[in-house]
Image: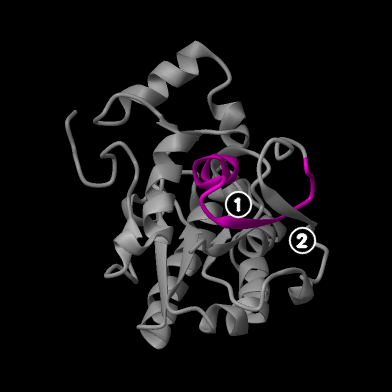
């Protein structure tokens, strides 16, 4: 039987790759600002801007088996030059907006035999990297929340987090805008390349499936080895 999976975001980047891999195998509901790039997939599109709109639960099935929150931000700059508003904005898009939606759809998730929630963090939370204070703080909130939520809702709902390193998506284009930047970024990773959207999506599909039914409350570093290996 197909699962009902809701993705918040998903019209580009990692979310779009998750949709590509799941297309036809699950019932996909995609709440995003645009339908662009989704025309060729079997999805129900829900026009939605997480920063502005209140999510309408009536647009999804009564039973929800999976929830994926894709929106995020990458604001890299020295701490001294970051205004407090940037911290507030990063926390909102990465964490607060997710909380608001998750609280609305939680009753739907509880009706599943065992629902799976997937959130995203960053390698910078564990590793500690300069110029990442804002995004690391926001994603640190995601990781702390994930473990507490997973403990509170086990065994009925599983929640896991993927923490990538630099991944080639539209969100990271400015950091990988030419071959020199890509090469320098690749060399910082033990596996000597930056991540692809498919690298992350493959792990996401596993965590949404019953193959990971004994996995919850985990932070998975899909990061080319950066968070655990020092090969310099």
Q: Which residue is drawn at 58% across and 72% down?
A: 64
**Which class describes the residues within 10 Å of circle 1: few (<14), some (14-19), or many (20+)?**
some
- The answer to whether residue 20 is magenta is yes
Measuring from the top left, give residue 28's x and y in whole percent: 62, 56
- Whichever of labels 2 and 1 marks the residue nearer the N terminus, that label is 2
| Residue at the image position 51 percent from the left and 47 percent from the top | 22
Residue at the image point whose x is 63% and y is 50% from the top: 82
Q: Position of residue 228 (x, y in %)?
A: 21, 46
Which of the 4 image quadrants contains residue 44? bottom right
Residue 35 coordinates in the image, percent (x, y): 78, 43
Is residue 177 left or right of 55 when viewed as pictured?
left
Tell me which segment is drawn in magenta. Answer: 15-35
Determine whether the residue tagged by mark 1 lies in a helix, strand or loop. Answer: loop
Question: Residue 168 magenta-drawn?
Answer: no
The reply, left or right, for residue 221 in relation to residue 68 is: left
Q: Which residue in the structure is indicated by mark 1?
A: 72
SS at mark 2?
loop
Cα distance between the residues tagged 2 and 1? 11 Å
Q: How many labels does the image show?
A: 2
Residue topped by disc 2? 51
């Amino acid at each position: 039987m197909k699962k009902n999976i809701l993705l918040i975001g998903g019209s580009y980047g990692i979310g779009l790759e998750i949709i590509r891999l799941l297309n036809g195998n699950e019932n996909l509901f995609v709440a995003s600002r645009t339908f662009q790039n989704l025309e060729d997939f079997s999805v129900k599109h829900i026009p939605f801007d997480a920063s502005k709109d209140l999510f309408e639960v009536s647009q999804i099935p009564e039973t929800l088996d999976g929830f994926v929150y894709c929106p995020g931000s990458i604001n890299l700059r020295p701490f001294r030059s970051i205004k407090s508003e940037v911290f507030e904005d990063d926390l909102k898009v990465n964490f607060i907006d997710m909380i608001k939606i998750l609280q609305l759809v939680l009753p739907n998730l509880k009706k599943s035999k065992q629902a799976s929630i997937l959130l995203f963090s960053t390698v910078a939370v564990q590793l500690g990297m300069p110029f990442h204070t804002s995004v690391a703080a926001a994603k640190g909130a995601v990781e702390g929340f994930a473990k507490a939520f997973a403990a509170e809702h086990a065994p009925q709902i599983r929640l896991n987090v993927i923490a990538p390193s630099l991944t080639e998506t539209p969100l990271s284009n400015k950091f990988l805008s030419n071959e020199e930047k890509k090469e320098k970024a690749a060399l910082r990773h033990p596996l000597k390349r930056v991540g692809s959207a498919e690298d992350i999506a493959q792990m996401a599909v596993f965590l949404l499936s019953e193959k990971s039914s004994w996995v919850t409350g985990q932070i998975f570093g899909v990061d080319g080895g950066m968070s655990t290996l020092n090969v310099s």
